[in-house]
Amino acid sequence: MNWIAVKSIYTFEMARFFRTITQSLISPVLSTSLYFVVFGAAIGSRIQEVEGISYGAFIVPGLIMLSVITQSISNASFGIYFPKFIGTVFELLSAPVNFIEIVCGYVGAAATKALFIGVIILLTAFFFVDITIQHPIWMVAFLVLTCISFSLMGFIIGIWAGNFEQLQLVPLLIVTPLVFLGGSFYSISMLPPVWQVISHFNPVVYLISGFRWAFFGSADVPIVTSLLAIAGFTALCLAVIGWIFRTGWRIRQ
């Protein structure tokens, strides 16, 4: 493993993040505050509790997952797409660096950025609601796994995208609806039976359910199922990235 190459890519990507640190911090804090005002105050006044948990606290895990997933995909996809766009990706491919080191650098940086945003949102939530984390170690584990897995997905999107419009296509048309339909702001048990069955085909349901369990000890699906789902999704993304670098699909275009 060429750790110098990994460090160089990682450091370069993180430096780009810290150059806009003010916007990176203000945006999640502001959006989190607005979510709590709209959902926590307006809707929370009508829905007092969900599964014995105050509605304001109940939406915190879903809100963190919403931001972490979108940030992971956005950071990773742009991180690899920009070298393609300006042509520096060929310098990377001709260097003595294998695809594992490239992935570690770009995905590691994107996951770190998303994790940083997730922590900021969690700290902001403490100012609005009273939150107790029953399983802090599992909370961190689910958060890190989500950052890594969706950064891998974002990396694939960045390679696939041929222009900036395509770069935004999948997050806007697929990922965001899946997150909102994955129980971010409600419990799956609140849905009609037919929609409960349909929801179980949404992979985001398992992530949010496991993350919410780490906070409150209750989940819509078994924790083992959530772990298997995120492990399977991560393995699938790694397999796709491995195939992309073996075949050169979209990289040399």
Image: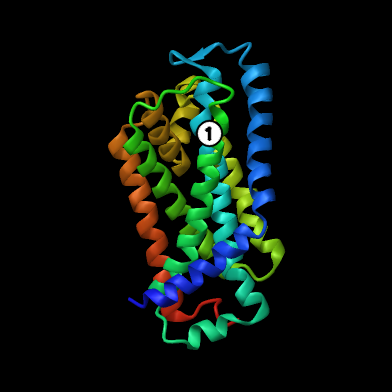
Along the line of sight, the residue nearer the viewer: 69 or 163: 69
Question: How is the rendered protein coloured?
Answer: rainbow
Q: Residue at x 60, y 81 (%)?
A: 88
96 vs 57, left or right, is left
Residue 209 seen in the figure: yes
The C terminus sits in image quarter = bottom right
Spot occupied by residue 141 in the image (x, y as percentages of width and height): 35, 43
Spot occupied by residue 235 in the image (x, y as percentages of width and height): 35, 58
244 vs 239, left or right, is right
Spot occupied by residue 127 in the image (x, y as percentages of width and height): 58, 25
Q: Residue at x 42, y 81 (%)?
A: 97
Residue 191 seen in the figure: no
**Above/below status of 28 relative to 80:** above
- Residue that carries the numbered disc 1 in the rendered image: 123
Residue 161 quadrant: bottom right
Q: Residues within 10 Å of mark 1 (few under 14, many from 20)?
A: few
The N terminus sits in image quarter = bottom left
